[in-house]
Image (cartoon, rainbow, N blue to C red):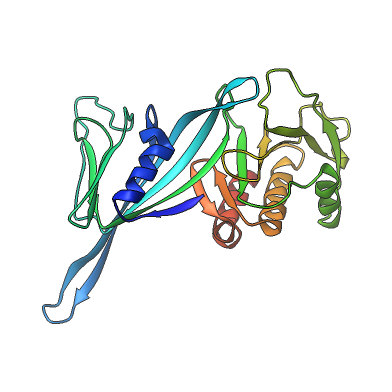
Amino acid sequence: MKRPIRNAEDLAWLVDHTHAFRGGQVTELHLHKQRLLDEVSGREVTAGTTITAVIRYEFAVRGSGGLHALTRVAKLTMRGATDFSIFEQEGADCSEIGAIHAEASGGRLRFWFDPHGELYVICDEAEIEEVSRPSAGRPLRAGMTEWTFQAQTGELPAVAWFLDHLDRAGLPCAWRAVKRSAPSHPALRWEGHLVPAAAHDAPRSSGVQVQTYGPLDGCDFVIILRASNPHEDGTGRLLVALADIIARSFAGTCLAGNHIMERDEWLGVHNLGWSARLEE
């Protein structure tokens, strides 16, 4: 999901959609300043400041069986920043958000990420990109790698589709289904493990875990890939191949760690670095 934020109406939507990021956490904060050379004075001048906050927060939705928790990861990009504060001292942590406050005034947007003003931004416009997935319930184990794809529209492929595309890519795999447990999320469609054919004696939980959901939080389907040990038995290569196959086949948004990317950005830039880290 991607939406520009330019006026009071957009801000009202943002606060309602995110529930003001209540209880969330700023996991990454980036400051980018553009400078241009003033040929008259021969000096560099600031041509624009962009501040990007990656925010992870929990959100409860009502479905069959009661309330179910979603984890949302949002990238809020604030462009044309003219005034901002990023202030921490004496052990304070401005990454914890009680609730975000926002207003539009005089053609500018103002964001306060906490009640004390340690983190605030005044800017010309903003944009939010976001990926949703069911909450894992417990943190990822050390060394585990996770990749999520959210498709706004489209039909979720079947297991056979994955097996066929992996065969074509020269990575034949076996499928080991996981029996659906009673407390699982109601949007869960199917889950299991894709295991390289050469590793047929590997434990049942090896290879790449695949979970699929849909519809979920306004999108048609979500695919989550997890590898417990991406450095073993070609699992890292399989994970990257699966991510590329999915991103090339469907329009949507990718989430790798805290990095939110449109599929073209993933295919054109980031997967090279991600692949290198998995194969080290």
**One can see residue 3 in this view:** yes
Q: Which quadrant of the figure has residue 176?
A: top right
Report x, y in % for residue 240: 68, 49
Report x, y in % for residue 164: 86, 51
Q: Which quadrant of the figure has residue 197?
A: top right
Question: Depth check: 138 or 20 in front?
Answer: 20
Question: Depth check: 108 or 78 in front?
Answer: 108
**One can see residue 171 in this view:** no
Please say if 247 is above or below 141: below
Quadrant occupied by the C terminus: top right
Please say if 142 is above or below 223: above
Q: How many badges with numbers are in the image?
A: 0
Question: Depth check: 177 or 37 in front?
Answer: 177
Report x, y in % for residue 180: 77, 24
Residue depicted at 73% across the width and 40% down the height: 235
Residue depicted at 68% across the width and 54% down the height: 244
In this view, the residue farthest toward the bottom is 40
Report x, y in % for residue 69: 54, 26
In this view, the residue farthest toward the left is 41
Question: Depth check: 162 or 215 in front?
Answer: 215
Residue depicted at 56% across the width and 53% down the height: 273
